[in-house]
Amino acid sequence: MATTEYRFEGLPLDPVRGGTSILVAGPAHGGTKELAYRMLAGDDAEGVIILTTNATAADIAAECETVGIEATPDRVGIVDCLDSDESGVPARVLTVSSAQDLTGIGMRYSTLYREFHQEGVEAVRTGLFSISTVLSLTELQTVSRFVHTLVGRVSKVDGLGVFLVDPAMHDERELRTISQFCDGRIDVREGPELRSQGFLGGAAEWVPFDPLPE
């Protein structure tokens, strides 16, 4: 079986092998979220699962469309932690009552992945938007276990994980603890500009990127 590779079209990032999880760290309104969505935008044969802790499924589906991810049931799955009304949302949606229910989030993620796999979708990009919301509701040890488990699932199935965090909301200990579970980290600042670490292109300096595809 060929090794899965994930490319980031139009971004100054090198492709990564399947099983990679990346922490995307930056301010909520500095292009960070837009970058994370663009990293989830692959080809039409790939699936996308987004775990949303602070936005409705309808909002997530709309934002997917802005970066070229067609939010259809055969392409996009959303775990909505706000338990919002999903009627009219084009993607397949599963809900939990709260972002504190990490067990429920994990179970619904597994359900969506299993459905995609059974339908022949081999490559799946997973977004957790965002760790910061979960950390504001739950203790660090519990969140760490959840992130560690999710990273393990992504690795096992040769997927891609993109995890959002706002550094301004956390102390250095929290960031260091969460970062250790991921294979790489991208920092984002207003401009927007990004700085990646290691295999993601190794750009030690800040480089500009377009928040939306051309």
Image (tube, grey):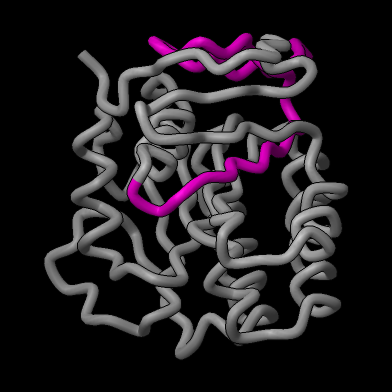
Quarter location, residue 106: bottom right
Quarter location, residue 203: top right
Q: Quadrant of the N terminus?
A: top right
Q: Residue at x 75, y 32 (%)?
A: 184
Magenta span dominant secondary structure: loop
Reply above or below: 116 against 129: above
Q: Is residue 78 left or right of residue 115?
A: left
Q: Nearer the viewer, residue 189 or 155?
A: 189
Q: Residue furthest bottom?
A: 97
Q: Is residue 99 magenta?
A: no
Reply above or below: 87 against 90: below
User: What residue span does the magenta drawing correspond to?
Assistant: 1-29
Q: Position of residue 70 (x, y in %)?
A: 25, 36
Q: Is residue 137 left or right of residue 150?
A: left
Q: Residue at x 21, y 38 (%)?
A: 65
Q: Residue at x 36, y 37 (%)?
A: 31
Q: Residue furthest left?
A: 88
Q: Residue at x 53, y 48 (%)?
A: 127
Count of labels shown?
0
Q: Is residue 36 left or right of residue 175?
A: left
Quarter location, residue 201: top right
Q: Position of residue 158 (x, y in %)?
A: 74, 32
Q: Quadrant of the C terminus?
A: top left
Reply above or below: 210 against 168: above
Q: Position of residue 24 (x, y in %)?
A: 59, 41
Reply above or below: 3 against 28: above
Q: Is residue 9 magenta?
A: yes
Q: Position of residue 35 (x, y in %)?
A: 42, 33
Q: Nearer the viewer, residue 207 or 53?
A: 207
